[in-house]
Image: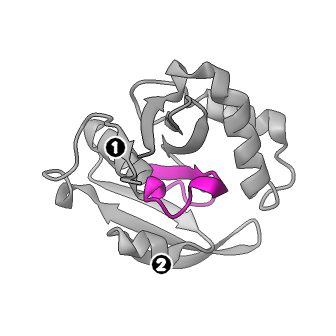
Amino acid sequence: MQQFTCHHLVDKPELLDKVAEAAQEEWGHINPDVGLAERKEYIQRHMQYSGVEQMLVAVDDNNDFAGMAGLTSHDMRNRKDLFGWLTILYVLPKYRGLGLGTWLTMQVEAQAIGEGLETIYLYTHDAQDFYSSIGWEKQEDSSYFGYPVTIMCKRLVAVLEQTPNNIYPFNTGN
């Protein structure tokens, strides 16, 4: 059985470079004006235990980076009217399909609830089906840096009773 644990990135600063590199590799093409150094600075601003700027990392049995997800106040420069966003959900390709992305999303939702948010947002250009399958609803189609995206939201009061307000380990059962 493979086990993963989730931590605030502030507790795993040695993973900062891996987190920034994964984010740059996955989304660098969307805004090529933002380089690795700027992306790392963005992530460093999220190295906190509380507030609406948090970054969580998942590690495997060997304490190696497996994935990440964050909570941020604003994730789209052109949508400052929406507050509280799930940001940079990413799972290493070798761990995809195990439920780790769902688990990380739930961890961020729990952090958002702990910060008093009732609704959380995200934008995606290709994962609408995934997010819909875990309770997110399409809010609108939009565009960001010339890419078509879908803005989605989730009412957190609906999951308040079923989502823990702590970070728990995740076992794949394999």
Give the magenta part as a residue range. Answer: 78-101
Question: Which quadrant of the structure image shows residue 108?
Answer: top left
Residue 26: x percent and y percent? 73, 56
Q: Position of residue 21 (x, y in %)?
A: 76, 41
Instruction: Report which residue position mark 2 lands on.
Output: 129
Determine whether 95 is above or below 126 in the image: above
Magenta region includes residue 61: no
Residue 145 horizontal/vertical position (percent) = 75, 65
Total tally of numbered discs in the picture: 2
Residue type marked 2: Asp
- Front residue of 148/57: it is 57
Q: Quadrant of the C terminus?
A: bottom left
Q: Between disc 1 and disc 2, whose residue precedes? A: 1
Instruction: Give the quarter of the image for residue 150.
Output: bottom right
Residue 3 percent location from the top left of the image: 42, 41
Left or right of residue 130: residue 125: right
Identify which amino acid the numbered label 1 is placed on: Ala
